[in-house]
């Protein structure tokens, strides 16, 4: 059997200091339980690691599978693509006309190649160092050779062109060239006439045509053979491809299943082994239970005698400690006088030499001593400025207070040391007390040294300033410093002016000018600081000016050093506990968070904070959530019928269902917050109690404070934002969704009428209203919403990117002016722009656009632009483009500045042109950075009620209208608005509109969420 072990925060094990206290049945069972729980903790920790490795391996295998399948698909396509390409090339020979066109095209290409070769050859000769005669000779040879080649090409071209013209115009194959002489070019006609003189031209063309036909038939036969081979090969290869693809997938799936099996089996075996070990250990304890119990009483007597003896000593030490605190307060005040006296003696100031042996003096004697010292220093007038300043700065309330505080640290250190010596015989608490004593003593020394160090600095700096004033140097040095500072500033202004002139004369570039400004500012500050250090007045003033903050910083460092030593002792020294507190502390903290911290863990600061939150939740939030404090809101109980049970027309009681619904949502959210708080507190207490059972001490407030200042800081600053988001964003959304499950609206208007829950009735109205052309209304609105969303997103984005890229070009001058002009549409409020443009397109003779077009003669009569469906839709998209592009322009302009120029230089070196640089470098870099904003633009366009409402009001109406009031430019959100305001003939119209809104919101949320996930994965 294993004796009880204790474990600190680092996992190090310790034996009990008093063996007799752990040689009992309870301790043995606790050790078995601790080993089992620690084994489970280790298994869980390893499970997280193994699970992470398994998931990574599975992801890697799936990625490899995708790559392998893609490679396999490419290989499959490559196997048949050769035959496919050959068949495609042979398609030129399906008819004689296509064959001749193909041959003529080849001849044209050959002619261009010959000409290109000749040009390159002549260019190379001009660059060579050969003799002129040699160059001329080679050019003549080239002319002769080129002439022969072109003659041959012309002959072939003429023959093929004549045959093509003949068979295109005549079906016979007699090749009577006289029939098409009027279609031939003069040069071709000349060639034909010459050829007629030497031979029979018809027979000549017949022979050529016959040869071409044989060639074509041969190629057609080859194409048919290739096509047959392709069909057979394609079929076989496709079957083979599918089988191989399935084999690759199966092989990967087998690997994943094997890894998953190994992971689960290993975890299962570890847990099983832990249970078996626990069972065996408990069985062994049961076997020797009688022997353990027989020795238990004897061990308890030994332990109790040692513990009682130590406790009596500790009680005596505590009693003495309280008396010592009272005496130490006076000693600490006297210590201030002692420090002052020693300082004055050190600096050769004549003072009385007092006896500062204080250890043997009683409380009354110490008080008399303090009064004597106080009277001496208050009545005596010292001539020395040093003495006067020392008395002034030593005998302050703050200095006395800090000295008393230091004295308390010293007394507490001695107390902890004595308690530790008394307890170390039976508990590790004694070792912790001794470490705490060392930390307190070091804190006392550090605090005292810091206080005296800065007192001395303050006295000496003040004394030096007084001496300088007395000697008359003060004014002189002050004037010298002002003169030197003025000289530095004048020199700085001169340098600035010189740099500006160089920029104007273009001796330096703008970036160089900016760097020069930074350099001059740094030089100015350094020069002024150097003058301050030279001046005794300024240097002493700087000492006094920074003294408080330097002392405060050092005090904070001393405090952190003390806290780190206590934290290290808390983590490294274990604590004994025999009680099983896990479930008790978890239950207490679930009922009242903070109780366990105050009662069991001694985490007083944390416990008080949690208790305050618990009091607020139990006295304010929970009662409010159940309908107390506000009678007009029923809280969670009022959710059941939205106050309908209180409705009474006779008594004039009209509960507002809207308040009941909104209040119910808030109440549920508040209860969720409270439940989460209580649950998290309970789990936290369970974990701390579990570690306490192992032997690990609960952490101190310093540890919690450090967590709040480091890794916990983002959570703390985000908490308020999350709470506000829940109440400002989530609550109205949830309420809107819940409204769709009621009959709120026409015939059920709150508060005059009651509102009831109707379940999915509003969602079922899609089918109920089908006979009233609801589906037609939906089709019209949804199709136009999609068109509007895509158009009013893509056009502003495209225009904004194009203008931004153009104005960012280095060849454009006055960029700032252009950018200012282009963002003006964004600066002007949207409703002003929409109202103004609407007035421009007014129908009749009053519209400005009509007046202009009539005056230019482009239209014969005035048009009602906004009363025609086509023009109204185009105009509303163009207006939204005008309003929206400026924001995209500004966004893209900012991101263009962040793209490194190195990548453009590298692209240019690789031979990329402007268009390629834009498509392959600029645009991908932009899309990565602005993708989330573009998704937001899409969602905003989908729900853009303002533009539609102000510019067109949803109109013009359709020729075939429905009872649901949709018009040609209505999107879902504007149509829903019409349903809630004007379509009063639908019972529960607002609830029905809420259902429509929920559906539309679901679509936009799904699209934006998918876009965000894709953009984030692409960025990763």
Image (spheres, rainbow, N blue to C red):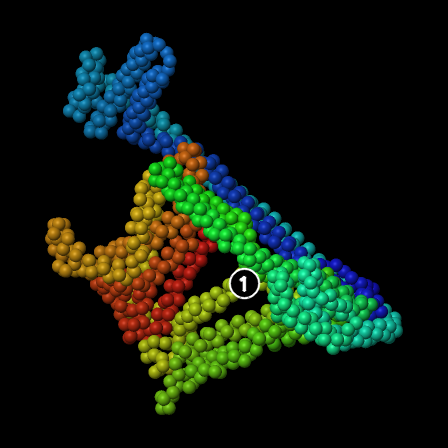
**In the displayed structure, does residue 540 sit left or right of residue 930?**
right
Which picture quadrant has residue 401? bottom right
Which picture quadrant has residue 595? bottom right
- Above or below — where is 312 with respect to 249? below
What residue sits 33% from the left and 26% below the top? 216
- Above or below — where is 522 with respect to 332? above
Q: Residues within 10 Å of mark 1 (few under 14, many from 20)?
A: few
Which picture quadrant has residue 551? bottom right
- Above or below — where is 764 with respect to 539? below
What residue sits 35% from the left and 44% below the top? 808
Can residue 564 be seen by looking at this rendering? no
**In the displayed structure, does residue 805 sit left or right of residue 959?**
right
* Residue situated furthest top in the rendering: 133
Q: Which residue is nearer to you in this view: 597 or 795?
A: 597
Q: Position of residue 872 (x, y in %)?
A: 23, 58
**In the displayed structure, does residue 392 sit left or right of residue 113?**
right
* Residue situated furthest bottom in the rendering: 650
Tag count: 1
Q: Which residue is nearer to you in this view: 695 or 336?
A: 336
Q: Secondary structure at mark 1?
A: helix
Q: Position of residue 361 (x, y in %)?
A: 77, 73
What residue sits 53% from the left and 53% below the top? 473
What residue sits 40% from the left and 61% below the top? 1003
Can residue 624 be seen by looking at this rendering? yes
Q: Position of residue 187 (x, y in %)?
A: 19, 19
**In the displayed structure, does residue 1008 sit left or right of residue 105?**
right
What residue is shown with label 1? 715
Q: Which residue is nearer to you in this view: 853 or 260?
A: 853
Q: Position of residue 164 (x, y in %)?
A: 24, 26
**On-image quarter of the N terminus:** bottom right
């Amino acid at each position: 059997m294993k004796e009880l072990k204790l474990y600190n925060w680092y996992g190090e094990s310790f034996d009990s200091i008093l063996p007799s206290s752990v040689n009992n049945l309870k301790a043995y069972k606790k050790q078995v339980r601790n080993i089992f729980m620690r084994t489970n903790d280790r298994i869980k920790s390893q499970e997280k690691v193994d699970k992470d490795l398994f998931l990574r391996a599975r992801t890697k295998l799936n990625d490899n599978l995708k790559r392998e399948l893609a490679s396999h698909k490419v290989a499959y396509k490559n196997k048949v693509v050769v035959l496919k390409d050959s068949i495609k090339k042979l398609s030129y020979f399906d008819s004689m006309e296509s064959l001749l066109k193909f041959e003529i095209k080849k001849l044209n290409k050959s002619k261009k190649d010959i000409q290109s070769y000749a040009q390159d050859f002549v260019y190379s000769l001009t660059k060579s160092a050969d003799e002129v005669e040699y160059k001329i000779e080679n050019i003549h040879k080239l002319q002769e050779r080129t002439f022969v080649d072109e003659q041959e090409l012309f002959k072939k071209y003429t023959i093929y062109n004549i045959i093509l013209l003949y068979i295109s115009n005549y079906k016979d194959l007699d090749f009577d060239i006289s029939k098409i002489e009027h279609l031939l070019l003069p040069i071709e006609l000349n060639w034909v006439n010459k050829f007629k003189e030497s031979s029979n031209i018809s027979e000549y063309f017949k022979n050529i045509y016959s040869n071409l036909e044989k060639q074509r038939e041969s190629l057609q036969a080859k194409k048919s053979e290739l096509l047959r081979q392709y069909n057979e090969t394609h079929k076989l290869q496709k079957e083979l491809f599918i089988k191989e693809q399935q084999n690759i997938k199966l092989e990967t799936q087998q690997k994943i299943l094997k890894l998953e099996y190994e992971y689960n089996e290993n975890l299962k075996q570890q847990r099983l082994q832990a249970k078996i070990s626990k069972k065996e250990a408990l069985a062994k304890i049961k076997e020797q239970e009688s022997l353990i119990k027989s020795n238990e009483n004897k061990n308890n007597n030994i332990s109790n005698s040692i513990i009682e003896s130590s406790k009596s000593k500790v009680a005596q030490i505590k009693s003495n400690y309280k008396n010592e605190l009272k005496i130490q307060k006076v000693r600490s005040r006297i210590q201030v006088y002692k420090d002052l006296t020693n300082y004055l003696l050190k600096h050769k100031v004549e003072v009385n030499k007092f006896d500062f042996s204080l250890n043997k003096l009683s409380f009354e004697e110490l008080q008399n001593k303090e009064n004597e010292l106080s009277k001496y220093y208050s009545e005596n007038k010292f001539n020395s400025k040093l003495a006067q300043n020392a008395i002034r700065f030593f005998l302050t309330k703050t200095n006395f207070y800090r000295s008393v505080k230091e004295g308390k640290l010293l007394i507490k250190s001695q107390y902890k040391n004595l308690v530790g010596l008394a307890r170390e015989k039976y508990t590790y608490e004694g070792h912790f007390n001794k470490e705490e004593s060392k930390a307190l003593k070091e804190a006392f020394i550090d605090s005292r040294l810091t206080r005296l160090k800065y007192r001395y600095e303050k006295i000496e700096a003040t004394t030096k300033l007084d001496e300088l004033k007395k000697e008359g140097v003060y004014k002189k040095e002050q004037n010298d410093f002002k003169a030197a500072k003025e000289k530095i500033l004048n020199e700085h202004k001169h340098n600035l002016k010189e740099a500006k002139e160089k920029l104007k004369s273009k001796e330096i570039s703008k970036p160089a000018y900016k760097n020069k400004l930074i350099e001059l500012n740094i030089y100015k500050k350094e020069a002024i600081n150097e003058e301050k250090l030279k001046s005794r007045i300024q240097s002493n003033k700087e000492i006094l000016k920074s003294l408080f903050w330097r002392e405060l910083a050092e005090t904070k460092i001393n405090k952190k050093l003390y806290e780190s030593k206590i934290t290290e002792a808390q983590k490294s020294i274990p604590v004994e506990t025999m009680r099983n507190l896990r479930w008790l502390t978890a239950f207490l903290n679930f009922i009242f968070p903070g109780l366990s911290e105050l009662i069991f863990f001694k985490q007083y600061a944390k416990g008080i904070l949690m208790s305050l939150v618990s009091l607020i939740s139990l006295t304010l939030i929970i009662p409010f959530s159940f309908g107390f404090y506000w009678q007009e809101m029923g809280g969670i109980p009022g959710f059941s019928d939205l106050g309908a049970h209180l409705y009474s027309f006779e008594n004039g009681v009209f509960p507002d269902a809207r308040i009941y619904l909104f209040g119910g949502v808030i109440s549920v959210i508040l209860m969720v917050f409270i439940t989460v708080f209580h649950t998290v507190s309970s789990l936290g207490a369970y974990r701390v109690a579990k570690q306490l059972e192992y032997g690990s001490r609960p952490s101190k407030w310093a540890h919690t404070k450090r967590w709040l200042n480091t890794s916990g800081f983002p959570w703390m600053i985000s908490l308020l934002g999350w709470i506000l988001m829940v109440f400002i964003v989530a609550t109205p959304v949830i309420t809107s969704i819940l409204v769709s499950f009621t009959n709120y609206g026409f015939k059920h208007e709150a508060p005059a009428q009651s509102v009831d829950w109707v379940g999915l009735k509003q969602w079922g109205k899609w089918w109920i209203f089908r006979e009233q052309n609801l589906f037609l209304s939906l089709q019209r609105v949804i199709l136009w919403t999609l068109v509007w969303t895509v158009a009013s997103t893509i056009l502003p984005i495209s225009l904004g990117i194009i203008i931004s890229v153009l104005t960012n070009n280095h060849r454009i001058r006055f960029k700032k002016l252009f950018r200012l002009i282009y963002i003006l549409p964004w600066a002007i409020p949207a409703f002003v722009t929409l109202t103004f443009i609407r007035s421009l397109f007014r129908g009749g003779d009053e519209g400005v656009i009509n007046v202009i077009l009539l005056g230019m003669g482009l239209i014969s009569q005035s048009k009602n632009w906004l009363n025609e469906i086509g023009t109204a839709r185009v105009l509303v998209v163009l207006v939204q483009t005008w309003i929206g592009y400026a924001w995209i322009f500004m966004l893209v302009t900012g991101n263009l500045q962040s793209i490194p120029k190195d990548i453009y230089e590298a692209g240019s070196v690789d031979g990329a042109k402007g268009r390629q640089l834009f498509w392959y470098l600029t645009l991908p870099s932009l899309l990565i950075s602005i993708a989330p904003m573009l998704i937001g633009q899409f969602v905003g366009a989908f729900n853009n009620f303002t533009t539609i409402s102000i510019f067109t009001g949803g109109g013009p109406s359709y020729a075939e209208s429905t009872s649901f009031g949709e018009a040609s430019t209505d999107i879902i959100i504007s149509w829903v608005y019409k349903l809630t305001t004007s379509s009063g003939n639908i019972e529960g119209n607002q609830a029905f509109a809420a259902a429509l809104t929920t559906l539309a919101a679901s679509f936009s949320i799904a699209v934006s969420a998918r876009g965000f996930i894709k953009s984030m994965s692409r960025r990763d």
